Image (cartoon, grey):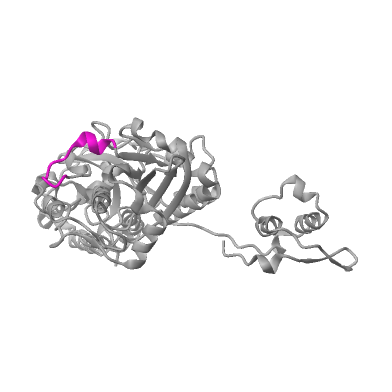
Amino acid sequence: MGILWRDLLTIEVHNENDDAEHVKPITQYHALFIILNEYRPFPPKIVELPWVNYFVKKRENTPMSEKKRVNLHWYGERGIVNSLITHVASLRVEGVQELLSKIEWGDPSQNEWIKDLKSVEILVEIGLAQFGDPDLIFVCKTKSGEFYTIIMEVKATTYLASALQGGRSRIQRQLELKYRFARSLAGRKKDDPVSESKMLHKAYMHRPQAYKLEKETKHPRKLSKQRVINLCQKTNLFKTSFDNFRFVAWTWDQEAFFHPGNVESQEYLPKFLQEDQTENWEWSQRRIGWLGYYSIERQSSFDNEAYKNAVSTMLPSKHPQVIKRGSSGVVTSINIEENFSDRTQLALAELQELANEYFIGKKMKSHKGSYSMRSRFSPIEKSKVLLKIIPKKKGRVQKILLGVSTVLERDCWGGIDSDYTARFGKQEFFFWELPNHSDKAREIVTPIFEELAEVLEIQQV
């Protein structure tokens, strides 16, 4: 913790008559409890010590307004990870065992070693250069001396929503890069860079077009930064054999993404390719796992306010609980230029511009009767529309509909509940009805776009 114990070996207290009383040297254990008493009570045996009892009573009799407190608040995905992992670390190896026991594995029989942990090193958001920045790495040593490493990627959304959203942060891409990192450790010598083989790089370079997540690097991926390599060596990560690596997705789902039917296409699963460009899914499944927010809090020691508060900054519940607010059936579109007023067309144009500002790397494209933002840059027939803007006309009244795909499993964004669910084309959307007034429409839409961009990890202006 970086505490200078030599400054705490003796203390002076004052009794009620302000007579100074010198106290004998105290142990580091006692000094630690003095520091932590702002956050947790003293054990009864320690409270019985006269000098400790003085501090306890002093604090109990001090009004809250006079106590000099520092309140720490965590926010976002990073805050969720940090708030949980600091608590888990405080529970020592037993805390890590409890957390890892909540992971649902593709093959549970391959992970009985978790019950036999001796020590654990935890790396938070270490930068692995071209292999990405994993949210968490657990380097575990068993009582038999064997090493296992769990690499975990965290999302404050569902697995499918992340897989659909496109860009570098999509969940299956991140898992693939960590697999490629683990494969690249085989045969490396001490202090050498971590270098991907040409054959493995070629396998991903020439994968089928439908499975390409982005343009591949021209040369094999590499990690050369010596400070990172030193840290990996210090934490024994490099002592883990390839077969003992595990890859986990921590997402906002009700059940594991790798169960049959939970993702609609193999395209959304990570591809752990061999150098011959094939994949042994049975081998892959033995090494993947899933962790859910609900699983973490259910019957656990992780019932702490810091973690719960951090989760609440990003998620409305522990797992998706969509409330459908009635359906209007099917929404259709008509030609905008021919059927809508200049005022409506101006509002539509401004909403399109606003969307393009919030969702960098994507485009809110205009069509004759609507605007749409697709999920990714894969072949068009495999992509989905995440966001839809459609003008609506009933008699002389004109409105604008904002639709968010139901695949995201949230009918409330930016603290604003959707008005109803309806289909447009082949997809279903949660719709918000907006006025055809530019300023009023922007006022409603802005917090929705803000939260969408944050949850989907899309860079904003």
Q: Where is the N terminus found, in terms of image quarters?
A: bottom right
* Image x and y of residue 2, in percent: 57, 65
Residue positioned 22% across, 56% down in the render: 167
User: Which is more toward the observer, 306 or 139?
Assistant: 139
* Image x and y of residue 147, in percent: 38, 45
Residue positioned 32% across, 42% down in the render: 244
**Is residue 282 on the magenta stretch?**
yes
* Image x and y of residue 387, in percent: 23, 51
Up-down relation of residue 272 to residue 214 (above or below): above
Q: In which quarter of the image is residue 345?
A: bottom left
Q: Where is the C terminus found, in terms of image quarters?
A: bottom left
Residue positioned 77% across, 58% down in the render: 55
19 horizontally vs 306: left or right: right
Magenta stretch, residue numbers: 274-286
**Does the rendering let one see residue 126?**
yes
Instruction: Give the overall secondary structure of the magenta segment.
Output: loop
Q: In which quarter of the image is residue 459?
A: bottom left
Q: Quadrant of residue 321?
A: top left
* Image x and y of residue 331, in percent: 19, 42
**Does the rendering let one see residue 393?**
no
User: Which is more toward the observer, 356 or 25?
Assistant: 25
Up-down relation of residue 276 to residue 329 (above or below): below
